Image: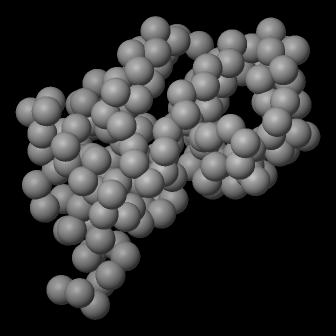
């Protein structure tokens, strides 16, 4: 049931991401042994589940909501996410937003900044979900510059090679 969540992606046995789970999928998450759910989506939208927090907490799962605007992501929200994720890295965690787009960027940044993953690999993970808009490319580049990491031309190279092979 959990693997049916839109844009489901499992990074490890303890870390899974996806789009917005519906009520049945939230209950499946509760029964699957997750200890933490992090929601980067916004409340009160057509895709959100009104009683998500209550469903998740009814299973004894810690629920964290860090609402991230899709049109104007904030660096501070990334740092809140990264700080929290580091504190629960030993737990089984499910991270989601509406379509796993915000999450794919936040996870890629986390894996590059905190875990030393090569940018190219992180970008390939993002592209398995979506092709980031200019807003999100700028957001990524801004964060990576402030941490002395660099994407360089990795995004354009991966896009050219994997998504747009005709753009050589």
61 relative to 157, above or below = above
Q: How many marks?
A: 0
Tell which of 1 and 105 is nearer to you: 105
* Quadrant including the N terminus: top right
Residue 147, placed above or below residue 87: below
Compared to residue 46, the image places residue 103 above or below, namely: above
Q: Quadrant of the C terminus?
A: bottom left
Whether residue 55 is situated above or below residue 17 in the rendered picture: above
Residue 25 shows in the view: no
Q: Position of residue 91 (x, y in %)?
A: 59, 13
Residue nearest the observer in this picture, 140 or 87 = 140
Q: Image quadrant of residue 157? A: bottom left
> In the image shown, does 21 or 158 lie closer to the viewer?
21
Residue 39 position within the rendered picture, expressed as x and y whole percent measured from the top left: 62, 32
Residue 56 in sight from this viewpoint? yes
Whether residue 137 sits left or right of residue 5 in the image: it is: left
Could you say where residue 147 lies in the image, as x and y percent from the top left?
A: 15, 30
Residue 63: x and y, percent? 68, 18
**Residue shown at 48% from the left, 51% from the top:** 70
The colour scheme applied to this rendered structure is one colour
């Amino acid at each position: 049931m959990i693997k049916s969540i839109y844009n489901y992606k499992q990074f490890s046995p303890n870390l899974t991401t996806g789009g917005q789970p519906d009520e049945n999928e939230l209950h499946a998450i509760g029964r699957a042994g997750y200890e933490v759910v992090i929601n980067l989506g916004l409340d009160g939208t057509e895709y959100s589940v009104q009683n998500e927090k209550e469903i998740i907490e009814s299973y004894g799962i810690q629920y964290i909501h860090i609402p991230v605007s899709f049109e104007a992501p904030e660096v501070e929200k990334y740092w809140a996410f990264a700080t929290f994720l580091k504190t629960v890295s030993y737990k089984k965690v499910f991270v989601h937003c509406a379509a796993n787009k915000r999450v794919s960027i936040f996870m890629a940044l986390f894996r590059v900044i905190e875990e030393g993953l090569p940018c190219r690999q992180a970008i390939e993970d993002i592209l398995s979900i979506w092709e980031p808009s200019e807003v999100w490319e700028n957001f990524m580049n801004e964060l990576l510059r402030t941490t002395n990491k660099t994407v360089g031309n990795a995004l354009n190279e991966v896009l050219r090679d994997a998504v747009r092979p005709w753009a050589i």
